[in-house]
Image (spheres, rainbow, N blue to C red):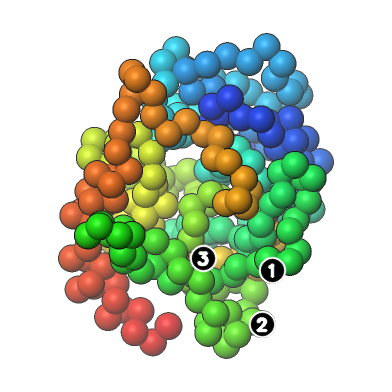
């Protein structure tokens, strides 16, 4: 198996569109498996295809736990972490797996998706590069976030596979061997069941000499923020606080970000 796509699901209204889009645009054939992780619920009308597998979690674990469960049963040489409301360019899976090197995490050019029409919102353009910044979110709260990096996009427009710093986190791919050696699973202690997973995997990759890349030879589109969030943000049995997650991530990585990464990125 070349690629396993792992997507956490919680009562996802666009599941059929997602699965159809992945399969329609795949070029890997039977070397692709798509693993949908049903996070504490069941759906009697799941899309069916030999390339699709489902994992049913008896209780809600949240996004991080659902991703861990999907990766644990995946068999691909590479795996992709994917939000459950994305569409793709033709051949995205082969383009990404052909290009991703053993010590890399990779994402693609990102557009914005209208999930109702299931089409790219061309009026919003696309994003290639993002800086990793510490963002003030009000009331004394801060978090790591990706910030659009227009100057680098202009200067490096002809570099089709390039190093970058930040991302939204809705889609990334890496070699399974790199994950097994340097990450193992997404940590839920401290971070909680959701958020900051892309920060965690990128920080651990940089700390072990790896790189985070953007591949502009293909693209994906993620649901625009004007449409309601559909993955669960906590239940009575699994409550969580996003501010605590953001604070914990900063506690873990702010010193490394300021003292090691920022100087290393000075010429980027």
Please provide percent x and percent y for residue 34: 64, 32
Residue annotated with mark 2 = 158
Identified at 48% across, 61% down, the residue is: 167
- Cα separation, mark 2 vs mark 3, equals 15 Å
Look at discs 1 and 2 and give the one toward the viewer. 1
Say whether residue 190 is visible.
yes
As displayed, is residue 173 above or below residue 210?
above
**Badge 3: how crowded within 10 Å, few (<14), some, or many (20+)?**
many
Q: In the rendered view, would you say 148 is above or below 84?
A: below
Q: Residue at x 70, y 37 (%)?
A: 18
Q: Could you say where residue 86 lies in the image, as x and y percent from the top left?
A: 66, 45
Decide if residue 124 is on the left or right side of residue 183.
right
Q: State which tag comes first along the sequence, 1 or 2.
A: 1
Secondary structure beneath dot 2 equals loop
Tell me the residue at 57%/14% (across/down): 42
Q: Residues within 10 Å of mark 1 (few under 14, many from 20)?
A: few
Which is more N-terminal, label 3 or label 2? 2
Name the secondary structure under disc 3: strand
Cα distance between the residues tagged 1 and 2: 17 Å
Query: On the image, numbered disc 3 is attached to which residue?
Result: 213
Q: Name the residue under label 1.
A: 125
Judged left or right of residue 51, residue 177 is: left
Q: How would you rate the neighbour count of disc 2 (Cα within 10 Å): few for under 14, some for 14-19, many for 20 or more?
A: few
């Amino acid at each position: 198996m070349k690629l396993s796509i792992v997507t956490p699901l919680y009562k996802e209204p666009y599941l059929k569109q997602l699965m159809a889009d992945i399969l329609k645009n795949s070029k890997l054939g039977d070397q692709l498996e798509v693993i949908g992780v049903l996070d504490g619920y069941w759906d009697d009308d799941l899309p069916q295809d030999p390339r699709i597998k489902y994992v049913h979690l008896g209780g809600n674990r949240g996004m991080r736990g659902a991703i861990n469960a999907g990766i644990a049963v995946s068999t691909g040489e590479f795996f992709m972490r994917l939000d459950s409301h994305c569409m793709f360019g033709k051949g995205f899976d082969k383009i990404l797996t052909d290009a991703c090197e053993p010590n890399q995490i990779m994402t693609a050019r990102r557009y914005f998706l209208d999930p109702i029409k299931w089409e790219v919102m061309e009026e919003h353009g696309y994003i290639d590069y993002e800086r990793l910044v510490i963002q003030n979110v009000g009331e004394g709260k801060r978090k790591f976030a990706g910030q659009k990096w227009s100057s680098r996009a202009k200067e490096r427009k002809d570099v089709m596979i390039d190093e970058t710093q930040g991302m939204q986190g809705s889609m990334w791919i890496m070699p399974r061997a790199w994950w097994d050696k340097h990450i193992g699973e997404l940590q839920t202690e401290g971070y909680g069941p959701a958020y900051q997973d892309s920060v965690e995997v990128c920080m651990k990759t940089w700390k072990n000499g790896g790189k985070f890349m953007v591949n502009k030879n293909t693209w994906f589109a993620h649901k625009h923020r004007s449409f309601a969030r559909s993955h669960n943000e906590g239940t009575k049995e699994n409550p969580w606080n996003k501010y605590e997650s953001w604070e914990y991530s900063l506690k873990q990585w702010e010193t490394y970000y300021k003292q090691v990464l920022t100087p290393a990125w000075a010429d980027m």
